[in-house]
Amino acid sequence: MTSLQTPDLPPAALTSSDLEPLLKAFNDVTARLTSTHESLQREVAQLKQELSDANQQVQRSRHLAMLGEMAAGIAHEVRNPLGSILLYARQLQEDLADRPAQATTATKIASAVSRLDAIVRDVLTFSRETRISEGRLCAGEVLSSAAEAARGSGPEWDSLTFTGPGPDADRLAIKGDAGLLHQALVNVIRNAAEAMHASASAAHPRQIILAARKRRVAASSANNTPASPSRRDMIALTIRDFGPGITPDIASRMFNPFFTTRAAGTGLGLAIVHRIIDAHNGQVTVSNVTPKDGPGAIVEILLPTA
């Protein structure tokens, strides 16, 4: 019996209507891949910048530690003769009590020595190893307490108002030493008040804005690479003023020891702030407010979450 064979039929030709959904799916996938690639590129660029900033903080901390050791040795050597000079000056004041003109000279010597001794104390505070006693702290309470303590009787506090930190800050917990963080924040707030007083203008409010929020930042580590830095959650405490802002030159040096733009002062206040924040494994940065938000500068202190 002869078998019947079915002849091979040519494949059906694809029409434009058949290709349309395939092309649409291909274009959709391509668009999503392009968007994802661009998003990843932006994320990597941001992480590289954050890692670079964090590593700069580490280098600055090392330099400050080395300078602190040197300053401590000098301060100890200076403090002993200063104590002797002050003792002799006070003895002269007593011996010259019946001669007011000469006693005035002895009083001036004693006052000058007291000022020098205050500088030496600041140097020793800066150079001393900062040991922290960690606890769980409320971000809102830390900021509010520092603002209240920073208030003074000088003209820079006249008509000055505080805004914030707001109820959201009370829900954020930080890990740190209450006393040391209080000292650092008081110092930063006082600097903000003095900056506004030096550039008083009726066109801008005399106001300091306090805030706290959670931030995810790059963590500096020897094992991290620019392509794959690790990240960690931190609490950002911000102090914003309406002063003249910070020039790039001052911003690069304002946390250096003995640098100051004021006629009085040792220039160690912000250097001590940096040491305190560094001891908390945190970061401190300063930047200008964007032009659309008006004049002023923002100091941001990043601290570990509790």
Image: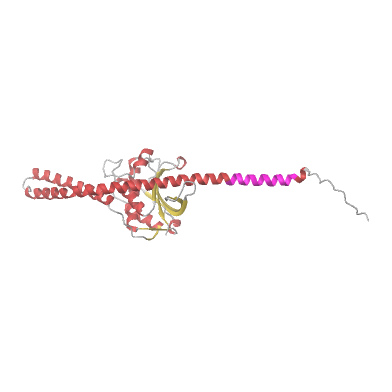
Q: Position of residue 44 (x, y in %)?
A: 51, 46
Give the image location of residue 197, x and y in percent: 33, 43
Q: Which of 61 and 265 is in front in this view?
A: 61
Identify the residue shown where x is 44% and y is 47%: 51
Q: Which of 72 and 83 is in front in this view?
A: 72
Magenta span: chief secondary structure:
helix
**Res 159 seen here:** no
Residue placed most toward the observer, 21 or 238: 21
- The image quadrant of residue 172 is bottom left
> In the image, is residue 286 part of the stretch drawn in magenta?
no
The outermost residue toward the right is 1
Residue that protrudes farthest toward the bottom in the picture: 135
Colour logic: secondary structure
Residue farthest along the front direction in this orientation: 1
| Image-based side of 223 in relation to 11, left or right | left
Per the rendered image, the range of residues in magenta is 19-36
Quarter containing the N terminus: bottom right
* Horizontal arrangement in the rendering, residue 126 relative to residue 88 (left or right): right
Quarter of the image for the C terminus: give it: bottom left
Residue 49 x, y percent position in the rendering:
46, 44
Residue drawn 23% across the image and 50% down it = 121
Q: Position of residue 298 (x, y in %)?
A: 40, 46
Q: Is residue 32 magenta?
A: yes
Residue 27 appearing in the image: yes
